Every structure is written in structure tokens, then in C-alpha cells.
Image (cartoon, helix red, strand yellow):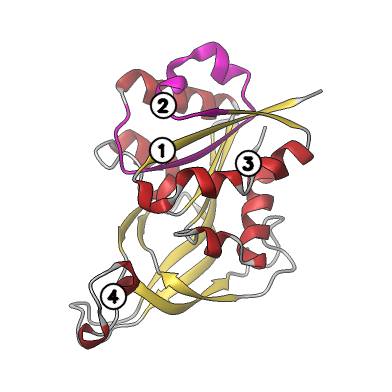
């Protein structure tokens, strides 16, 4: 039986929603999925389409979502449709919607920056060398089992979250003198979430295509897509 994946992409262009999702569409097809691509999240309001969708891969940073579309997405996930994504495409979507944030379980808050004298005025000011560290659960979970911690130089997401998520990997923000917090802060970097009959997968690395091409990050995302799917 053919499984169906719905790729919904758009929002802020800085996260390269087309190029980023294009990395994984061939993988989904190789895994036997029929893939449909949409650039308008209003597809979530189509109950028939959503009922026949086994996996939603969303890459929509910021943007907005209508009431009917959000209701449709939540209902589909609760009924068993998987929801998966990375970075701002899932963890920084629809900031004004508390119901969306509850569904996903974590929301981007900030990405700390370099020392002020090292900043040049572009996005690289927020590229920090940091480590994504597997948790004890992550060392056993099918999404991350057998993988090693990974060191990246890219945006390091500080995430606001609740305790219904199952954290597979974390990253720790230091407390340098140029930022206002007073002790290191550990944020989830990879997590899963059960919602009704559905599954949600989130990886915070993925600011740019080169990060997604990192062998460990790519493996985590590919496994996460399959894990979340109905």
C-alpha cells in the first residue's frame, strides 16, 4: 500500500524552504511515499486530503495559519497523521497561534550571538560552535540510536518547551558576559511527541542546506520522518 506524504513549504525565504525540502523528497519517494508539495498551508483545512495523508513534512518559518487550517492540522495529527520538520520550519511557525505551539511542544525563542566585536552584521553573527548531545533516551530511541553527539557551527536554538516532549538530544547555551542570562541553559535540540494517535518529530538543526547535509543531521531527519509517519 502506497503511503502519502504532504510537503508544505514557504514562509521566510532565509531558511531555503524549497532547497531544504528538496533534499528529502527523493528519500521519501525511495521509501515508497507518494509525495505532494504545497506552498499554501490552507491545504490543512481539506479534511479528505489530510485523512489520506500519512506524513506532513512542514517547512514554513513564521507566517500565519488560518483557524480552519489549524483545526484541520490538529485533527489530522490526533487521528494519526505524522507531523515532522526541522529548525524554523516547524519550531518557529505561526508564532501567534498558541494551539499550534501546543501541538508541536516547543517554540524558538532566540539564537545567541557571537562576541560583539566579532559580529559583521549578517546572519553569521549568530553562528556558534556548539554540540548536540544525545540524552539517555536518545541513545535508545529509533530516531537517534547508534549515533554520536555532533558538533555544528550554525544557529543554536534556544527553545521554550513543555514536559510532554520526549527529548532525544539537547544543546547547552553558555552564559557569556555579553548576554543577560546568568547560568548555562540547556534546550531540547531533537524531540518527539505523541498527540492522540499521531506522532510529531522536531529537529532544531537545519538553518541552511549545508547543515541538513551533515551526515548525522540528515540521518536524524530521515529517521524522524519515518518514525513520525502513520
Q: Which residue is mark 3?
A: 228
| Residue density around tag 1, few if under 14, some if 14–19, many if 20 or more, within 10 Å | many
Asked which secondary structure carries label 1, the reply is strand
Magenta region? 37-65
Q: Position of residue 127 (x, y in %)?
A: 38, 73
Marks 4, 2: nearer the viewer: 2
- The residue shown at (28%, 42%) is 95
| Residue density around tag 3, few if under 14, some if 14–19, many if 20 or more, within 10 Å | many
- Distance from disc 3 to disc 4, alpha carbons, whole Å, reads 32 Å
Q: Which residue is mark 1?
A: 10
Instruction: Answer with mark 3 or mark 1, whichever residue precedes in sequence.
Output: 1
Q: Which residue is mark 2?
A: 40
Residue 207 vertical position relative to residue 186 in the rendered view, above or below: above
Labelled pair 1, 2 in contact (Cβ < 8 Å): yes
Labelled pair 3, 4 in contact (Cβ < 8 Å): no
Which residue is most to the right?
1
Asked which secondary structure carries label 3, the reply is helix
Marks 3, 1: nearer the viewer: 1
| Residue density around tag 2, few if under 14, some if 14–19, many if 20 or more, within 10 Å | some
Residue 196 vertical position relative to residue 19 in the rendered view, above or below: above
Locate the C terminus by quadrant.
top right
Instruction: Answer with mark 1 or mark 4, whichever residue precedes in sequence.
Output: 1
Q: Which residue is mark 4?
A: 113
- Distance from disc 2 to disc 3, alpha carbons, whole Å, reads 22 Å
Marks 3, 4: nearer the viewer: 4
- Distance from disc 4 to disc 2, alpha carbons, whole Å, reads 32 Å
Is residue 48 one of those drawn in magenta? yes
Which numbered circle lies on residue 227?
Answer: none
Asked which secondary structure carries label 2, the reply is loop
Amino acid at each position: 500500500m502506497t503511503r502519502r506524504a504532504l510537503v508544505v513549504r514557504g514562509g521566510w525565504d532565509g531558511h531555503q524552504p524549497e532547497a531544504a525540502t528538496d533534499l528529502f523528497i527523493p528519500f521519501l519517494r525511495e521509501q515508497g511515499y507518494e509525495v505532494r508539495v504545497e506552498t499554501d498551508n490552507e491545504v490543512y483545512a481539506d479534511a479528505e486530503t489530510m485523512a489520506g495523508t500519512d506524513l506532513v513534512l512542514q517547512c514554513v518559518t513564521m507566517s500565519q495559519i488560518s483557524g480552519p487550517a489549524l483545526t484541520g492540522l490538529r485533527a489530522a495529527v490526533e487521528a494519526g497523521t505524522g507531523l515532522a520538520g526541522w529548525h524554523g520550519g516547524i519550531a518557529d511557525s505561526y508564532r501567534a497561534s498558541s494551539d499550534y505551539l501546543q501541538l508541536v511542544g516547543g517554540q524558538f525563542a532566540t539564537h545567541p550571538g557571537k562576541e560583539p566585536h566579532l559580529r559583521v552584521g549578517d546572519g553569521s553573527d549568530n553562528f556558534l560552535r556548539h554540540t548536540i548531545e544525545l540524552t539517555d533516551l536518545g541513545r535508545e530511541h529509533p530516531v537517534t540510536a547508534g549515533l554520536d553527539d555532533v558538533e555544528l557551527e550554525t544557529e543554536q536554538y534556544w527553545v521554550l518547551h513543555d514536559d510532554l516532549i520526549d527529548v532525544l538530544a539537547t544543546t547547552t547555551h553558555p552564559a557569556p558576559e555579553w548576554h543577560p542570562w546568568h547560568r548555562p541553559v540547556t534546550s531540547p535540540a531533537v524531540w518527539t511527541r505523541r498527540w492522540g494517535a499521531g506522532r510529531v518529530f522536531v529537529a532544531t538543526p537545519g538553518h541552511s542546506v549545508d547543515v541538513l547535509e551533515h551526515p548525522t543531521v540528515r540521518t536524524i531527519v530521515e529517521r524522524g520522518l519515518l518514525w513520525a509517519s502513520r
